[in-house]
Every structure is written in structure tokens, then in C-alpha cells.
Image (cartoon, grey):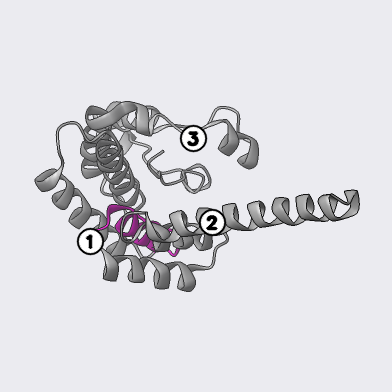
Amino acid sequence: MNPRVLRRFIVYLAVATVVMFTIWTVFQEQFEREPGDYQTEMGGNRLKDGRHDEALDYFGKALDEAPNHRGALMGRALVFIDRQQYDLALSELTYLIEFLEANLEADDRTGKAALAAAYANRGIVNDREGRHEQALADYIEALKTDSGAVEGPGWVDKLLYGDPNPSTIRDRAQYIHEQLKLPEDQRVLRIPEIDAEQRPYKPR
């Protein structure tokens, strides 16, 4: 066989292999995932970029495909928290908590992490709105549900946000608990410049 023809055949075969692998990967990504997962991932990417309207659109599409998709519900709540639309965030998180508590399987570890994150985020909303007793109750429930899921940001977040020792909900819960034991006129429950740095949780 002519070496030039053989070489061309090998190159074509390699290109065809790469193309078929790419098509197969895209097929798996698009069609073999659970309903709503792809749209939720796209919404999460838009949320990271601060493109809230687009994120909500994707989360809405995910919920059209899979009503009660926990990632999409959480994503919507995070958009509302970012926008300081706390009433909407509270409603979304309360619905998600009630849905998960009613439907969670005992061995669903990612579901437990989602439930813990929902409690933690509802605690943050209550905290920012000055409902500190409710915030404390939510933080405690988050830690009881899955403490590992809400122990604080990972090293990537620490690097991105420049804080090697960020406050966790455990820290915040302990602080609120101690402050609530003091006479009301001695409590310091809000320090706006510090409170503003508290970031919501997404299940890992």
C-alpha cells in the first residue's frame, strides 16, 4: 500500500474517532442526564456570572422538565438572595425544605446535602432580615441534617474571595446563641460590613 495513502487513511481515522467521541459525549450530556439537570447546570453558570435573568430562565426551563427539581429550586433561591429579594428567597427555600423533608430517601446523600444547604440559606435570609431566633433554628437544623455540607467554603472559594478563615454557619450560630443570652440592650447581632460577606451555600 502506498505510504502516503496509508498516512492519509490514519489521519482520517483519527479525526473520525475524535468527532465520534465528541458526538457521543454531547449525546450523553444532553440526553442521558436526568430531566432538568442540563438546564440547571446552565442556570448555575449564568448565576456565577451574575446574569440573573438568564439564570432564572434556565431554572424555569428545568422546572418545566422536572417539577420540584431541587437544584433548580435552590438556584432560584440563590438568585433571589443575590438580588436581596428576601421574601421570594424565603418562600422558595421553605418550599424546597418541605418538599425534601416529605420526599427524601434515607440513603440519598446528595438530597441530605441539599436539605442542609436549604436550611443554611434560609438561616442566612432570616439573619439578614433580623429574625435571629429563626436564623439560629435554621442553622442548627442545617448542621443536624448534614454538617459536612455546610461547614464552609472550600479552598477554591477561599482563594477567590481572599479570606482564608471565613465565618461558617456553625460560628454564626454560636455567636447568635451567645448574644441571645444577653439582655436585649447589650446584644450586638448585626454588623453590616461583616454580615454582607456571608455567602449562601450550594450543595457540593
**Farthest residue toward the front?**
1
For residue 48, the mark is 2
- Foreground mark, 2 or 1, reads 2
Is residue 174 in sight in this rendering? no
| Image: 76 above or below 111 | below
Displayed quadrant of residue 203: top left
Displayed quadrant of residue 140: top left
Q: Position of residue 27 (x, y in %)?
A: 46, 59
* C-alpha gap between disc 3 and disc 1: 25 Å
> Which of the marked residues, 2 or 3, is nearer the chain's N terminus?
2
Foreground of the two, 182 or 165: 165
Magenta segment, which residues? Answer: 69-84
For residue 192, the mark is none
Q: Position of residue 111 (x, y in %)?
A: 25, 41
**Left or right: residue 182 compared with residue 20:** left
Say which residue appears at 45% left-offset and 67% top-offset. 55
For residue 153, the mark is 3
For residue 91, the mark is 1
Amino acid at the residue labelled 2:
Lys
Task: Name the secondary structure under disc 3.
Answer: loop
Q: Position of residue 52 (x, y in %)?
A: 48, 68
> Which of the marked residues, 2 or 1, is nearer the chain's N terminus?
2
Task: Name the secondary structure under disc 1.
Answer: helix
Say which residue appears at 25% left-offset and 48% top-offset. 131
Foreground of the two, 143 or 171: 143
Q: Residue 81: within the magenta?
A: yes
